[in-house]
Amino acid sequence: MESESKRKKESPNTAELAVTASFPDEVLEIVLSLLTSHRDRSSVSLVCKDWYRAERWSRTQVFIGNCYSVSPEILTRRFPNIRSVTLKGKPRFSDFNLVPPNWGADIHAWLVAFAAKYPFLEELRLKRMAVSDESLEFLASNFPNFKLLSLLSCDGFSTDGLAAIATHCKNLTELDIQENGIEDSSGSWLSCFPESFTSLEVLNFANLTSEVNTDALERLVSRCKSLKVLKVNKSISLEQLQRLLVRAPQLEELGTGSFLQDLTARPYADLESAFNNCKNIHTLSGLWEAVPLYLPALYNSCANLTFLNLSYTALQSGEFAKLVVHCPRLRRLWVLDTVEDKGLEAVGSNCPLLEELRVFPADPFDEEIIHGVTEEGFVAVSFGCRRLHYVLYFCRQMTNAAVATIVQNCPNFTHFRLCIMTPGLPDYLTNEPMDEAFGAVVKTCSKLQRLSVSGLLTDLTFEYIGKYAKNLETLSVAFAGRSDRGMQCVLEGCPKLRKLEIRDCPFGNEALLSGLEKYESMRSLWMSACNVTMNACRRLAKQMPRLNVEVMKEDGSDDSQADKVYIYRTVAGPRRDAPPSVLTL
Amino acid sequence: MSQDTTVDSPESSDGASLMSFDTELTLGLPGESRSPARAPAFAQGHKKNCTKRGFMETVIDLNLGTSHISMPRGQNSESRVSGTGKYPAAKAQVTGWPPVRSFRKKTLEGSSKLVKVAVDGAPYLRKVDLQIYSSYQDLFRALEEMFTCFTTRGDDNMEERKLTGALNGREYVPTYEDKDDDWMLLGDVPWKMFVESCKRIRLMKSSEAVGLAAPRTPTNC
């Protein structure tokens, strides 16, 4: 921009130049409005003042990875025209009960600010936020253009809040309620959608348990001709599902209800025919209590499936193998480890296009030895599915050699999340630490963005990570490492690191303080049950005013130890809504 | 008889472990004494590797009469699944580990009637969802498939024990533990009542089935 204004002063005033010389803001804004990636937009805004200005006026979507990194006031001041907001709140370890209740991340203050500054807000996507019924009611009443609500891993609300949304949001296109700590008092919220309401395109209430009025649901599905995604809950029977499918043959994503029912021949044939009629289904989930007998009704639908989520169905290997034969186009698969290695072998043999695999444990907390998947299943998949780049794998044993083979077969991993469920377990064949396994991963997979490590690990693992994982953005570590050096290697070596979460590791003050400057380039650091003291945290807080250093104290613990530390960069200063158990240093 | 192989991991000579790890993971059969040396293996960098899983300090005795079971992949041990199938509940759960969302855990718990199935001679337990079967025949078919698959895997030393036909009561006696903690024969009660009251299943070797009624063909319900 500077050079253009210079040219303007120096060159003759031709008509051509008059057009290009002072690049009008409006044009710049139009050009920039084509940019959707928020990272690109951040870069753009740094070019110069004109671009900063144009960018802030043209931005309509904002993504905030840590709700405390910025305040509603700062956000609304900078961006006047936002229509879509994505907010993430609590640290990820809150999913595993490591964060005290009432920690924060309440959406309400944001909604109040949005009501004043973004009355035309259309979309709200929340993850790990505290959302109350009052907030949902407020949302429903203050944003007449509101279209899309997505709540993932949120808590604090009940079906009453959903009733408010259904009642008042006349332009709603998407209601997506996933995996929330929700109080489900009744299914009557669904009946609150007015008869005149027809705009719904996405409805996901698989998370909820109460029965909904199936007549109301049928009528809703019938009149919403643009409905593409329907994920019902367990209370919906197979027969009811069949009636819904008949009314929505245009569906692209389906979450079934319970697959458990005594179907006589005729209803089974109807079900099969209803599935066959839905030619556009590419995503299938639900299948609660899937009786193997009825799975064949799905077989024809499976031909076009790209995403199959069986993570709530305890299928055994035989039944699963029979199903997977029919899914040659699968790109994403989520299963329970009840399918065992044999089931995964079937995946390797039948799903050459597979890109993502998640294997969840059916019984993670059991004391006794329950079979599940081993390294063999993972290896089998890697031989058959060379495009695999995202894996989440819970297992009870692993070897360095197996992982080396896996990444040799699939060098394009972007997300490698391996959870060997017993803490500190070595390679069960050689009894060595699992260092070489993760070494192989980081050496071979140059595109690696996310890594979760497990098993018996020394500092060598972290040396490898620091040395090779140049694109790593998220690292999760538990029960690993030997000394501060481990953590230091990561902090010094991974230039793109944004999120580091550590629990139960022997990393202490030296490690914590070695990352002083680093933390400002990261979104956040979590350290719990490590060897960090309050004094070190205070020192860190003092030296780095643009970081919030929060310590969560456990009852009865040593005063000098910092049990749980959460450090994040922010332009909003220390937060004022922390509960008593959270100290901001 | 228990076999204890203490394997020193290379790091065990490393000085102080800076771990503040207050979880005691100990497992063993009832009545076994715990030596103080058996501190959390993880914290001390030791690994006691009794089973092919290297599951910390788990000692399982598998008694197969004349034959030894050799663990797949070359590790040997003798183990017996105890008659009651109960392990002492000494293991303290580590908060938030494994990292499975509580939502998922609750959902799985609520949605099915999963019971453990132990087979004498197999070092692994399985879980089946009783709700998805509609009769004893269905269940037996599934069990056969499950455990036949298992026993034919692994290395050559293992005697192949096909359960086909074995569940007629000749080689194995299908038993289950009911709500009152009694061990009953599978097939004695109507199917639905069985699903309701069954807590776990054990396929017991006929030679061990003392004290139960004589094996007979399970009734169809």
Image (spheres, grey):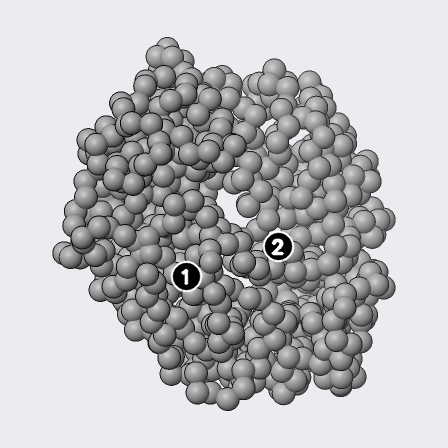
Position of residue B213 in the picture relative to residue A463 (left or right): left
Chain letter of mark 2 equals A
The residue at 16%/47% (across/down) is B160
| Closer to us: B102 or B168 | B168
Vertical position of residue A574 compared to residue A318: above or below: below
Q: Position of residue A162 (x, y in %)?
A: 72, 33
Vertical position of residue B67 compared to residue A141: above or below: below
Please give the residue where the numbered disc 1 appears in the rendered image.
Answer: B58
Please give the residue where the numbered disc 2 appears in the rendered image.
Answer: A95
**Label number found at residue A319:** none
Q: Amino acid at mark 2?
A: Asp
| Closer to us: B170 or A519 | B170
- Residue A451 in sight here: no
Vertical position of residue A11 compared to residue B79: above or below: below
**Quick one: which residue is furthest to the left in this view?**
B156
**Quick one: which residue is furthest to the front in this view?**
B211
Q: Amino acid at mark 1?
A: Thr
Q: Position of residue A469 (x, y in %)?
A: 44, 76
Residue neighbourhood size for the residue with mark 1, other residues' Cα within 10 Å, grouped as few (<14), some (14–19), many (≥20): many
The residue at 70%/27% (across/down) is A186
Q: Secondary structure at mark 1?
A: loop
